[in-house]
Image: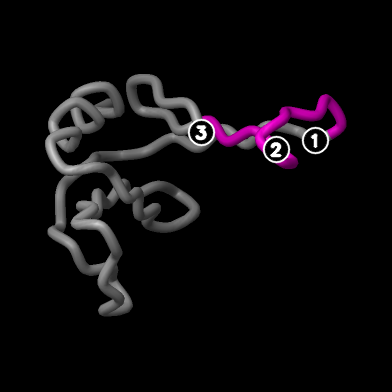
């Protein structure tokens, strides 16, 4: 996953290696905000990770980030 202002880029990986056959998915996000440590479905994440929500045209994308990295990810991804 790569982040740029207002966009999330997902590339196909197999075993941590990018293969050229898959088409990258580019998703425009409308906003980014922190929601705590529980997903929309009420699931808790392990390791104290925080959940960021990024609403988009295809739905809300939930991103788990390490503690202390929330503001950096929000700043990098903000439209």
Which residue is situated farthest in the bottom direction here?
Answer: 42
Identify which residue is drawn at 45% across, 33% down.
8
SS for tag 3? loop
Q: Which residue is mark 1?
A: 22
Tag 2 and tag 3, C-beta contact below 8 Å = no
x and y, in percent, of residue 31 in the image: 24, 40
Identify which residue is drawn at 70% across, 37% down.
12
x and y, in percent, of residue 62 in the image: 35, 54
Separation (CA) of disc 1 from disc 3: 14 Å
Comes first in the chain, label 1 or label 3: 3
Identify which residue is drawn at 53% across, 30% down.
9
The answer to whether residue 30 is left or right of residue 25 is left
Q: Quadrant of residue 74?
A: top left
x and y, in percent, of residue 44 in the image: 26, 72
Q: Which residue is mark 2?
A: 12
Q: Which residue is mark 3?
A: 1
Report the magenta residues as a range: 9-21
The answer to whether residue 59 is left or right of residue 37 is right
SS for tag 2? loop
Q: Quadrant of residue 21?
A: top right
Relative to the observer, which residue lies in front, 33 or 65?
A: 65
Q: Callout 2: 10 Å neighbours few (<14), some, many (20+)? A: some
Separation (CA) of disc 2 from disc 1: 6 Å
Q: Callout 3: 10 Å neighbours few (<14), some, many (20+)? A: few
Comes first in the chain, label 2 or label 1: 2
Q: Is residue 67 magenta?
A: no
Relative to the observer, which residue lies in front, 70 or 66?
A: 66
């Amino acid at each position: 996953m790569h982040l740029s202002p207002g966009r999330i880029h997902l590339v196909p990986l197999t075993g941590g290696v990018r293969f050229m056959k898959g088409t990258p998915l580019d998703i425009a996000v409308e906003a980014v905000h922190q929601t705590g440590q529980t997903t929309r479905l009420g699931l808790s994440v392990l390791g104290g990770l925080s959940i960021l929500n990024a609403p988009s045209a295809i739905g809300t994308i939930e991103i788990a980030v390490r503690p202390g990295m929330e503001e950096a990810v929000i700043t990098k991804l903000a439209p």
